[in-house]
Image (cartoon, rainbow, N blue to C red):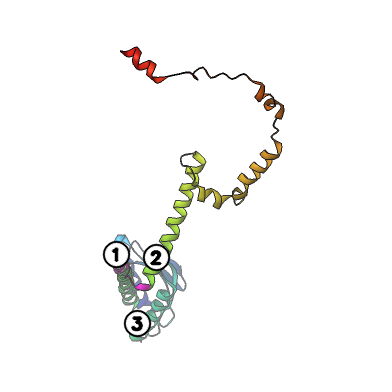
């Protein structure tokens, strides 16, 4: 006849010696204890940790112990589910034998696998980022392929921009008095200029008055011609 109590006491002593820092008894009746399992350090010291809680049933090890995840750190929900499935499988395969050490070892290995998976995912993400950066650099180096359509589009946009720049520059120079507008430019800016000169002359003609009395006594003026008796020969004789 199997002495379940004896087998349970012996296993408990062995587990306490194997896991002195992570083993903790919570209750003696029924025997309940926890074991904290930590993965090996991964890249950048990434680690995952889980605390398992076990309770002996009366007929353990012919019946599996009760187990649950008491606490966990850095584990996804999917990882927790996979560990519970693993415990169930290992407990079923090891019926009839004390199995706590076997269960803890299986969980330890699973935690290490999880860390490796995290490392692999990180490396894959870095590889994708590097690939995307290389593709972006390649596109930037090659530039845009020139076609008739995009060239004409660029040309139209460029000409509009240049015309706008020229217009702004001309306006600034005009305001600063640096250039003198041509007649054509003046007429283009003020269509009233083509009639302004005529209007000015008409207004001037209507407003200027002439005093005719100033010219009435012109015939009475004694205008003598001092050179009426001038003879060019006299100048020749004087020279002789």
Picture coordinates of residue 14, whole percent (x, y): 31, 70
Check whether the beta carbons of the residues at disc 3 and disc 2 lie within 8 A of each other.
no
Quadrant of the image occupied by residue 237: top left
Picture coordinates of residue 174, whole percent (x, y): 50, 43
Quadrant of the image occupied by residue 7: bottom left
Q: Residue at x 42, y 19 (%)?
A: 231
Residue 35, compared with residue 91, is above or below; it is above
Indicate whether residue 142 is drawn in magenta. yes
Give the SS element for disc 3.
helix
Instruction: Report the quarter where the C terminus lies.
Output: top left
Which region shows up in magenta? 131-148
The dominant secondary structure in magenta is: helix
The disc label shown at residue 137, or none: 1
Q: Residues within 10 Å of mark 1 (few under 14, many from 20)?
A: few
Give the SS element for disc 2.
helix
Q: Residue at x 33, y 74 (%)?
A: 110
Q: Residue at x 44, y 81 (%)?
A: 58
Closer to the camera in the image, 131 or 182: 182
* Residue 30 seen in render: yes
Picture coordinates of residue 115, whole percent (x, y): 32, 69
């Amino acid at each position: 006849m199997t002495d379940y109590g004896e087998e349970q006491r012996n296993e408990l002593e062995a587990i306490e010696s194997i896991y002195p820092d992570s083993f903790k008894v919570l209750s003696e009746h029924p025997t309940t204890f926890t074991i904290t399992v930590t993965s090996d350090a991964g890249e950048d010291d990434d680690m995952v940790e889980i605390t398992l809680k076990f309770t002996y049933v009366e007929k353990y090890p012919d019946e599996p112990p009760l187990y649950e995840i008491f606490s966990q750190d850095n584990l996804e929900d999917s990882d927790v589910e996979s560990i519970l499935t693993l415990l169930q499988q290992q407990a079923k395969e090891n019926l009839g034998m004390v199995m706590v050490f076997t269960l803890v070892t299986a969980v330890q290995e699973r935690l290490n696998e999880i860390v490796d998976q995290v490392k692999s995912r990180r490396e894959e993400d870095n590889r994708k980022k590097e690939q995307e950066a290389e593709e972006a650099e390649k596109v930037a180096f090659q530039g845009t392929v020139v076609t008739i359509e995009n060239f004409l589009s660029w040309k139209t946009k460029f000409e509009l921009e240049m015309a706008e720049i020229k217009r702004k520059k001309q306006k600034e120079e005009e305001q600063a008095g640096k250039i003198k507008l041509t007649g054509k430019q003046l007429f283009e800016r003020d269509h009233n200029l083509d009639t302004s000169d005529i209007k000015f002359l008409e207004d001037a003609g209507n407003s200027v008055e002439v005093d005719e009395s100033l010219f009435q006594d012109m015939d009475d003026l004694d205008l003598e011609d001092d050179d009426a008796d001038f003879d060019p020969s006299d100048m020749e004789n004087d020279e002789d």
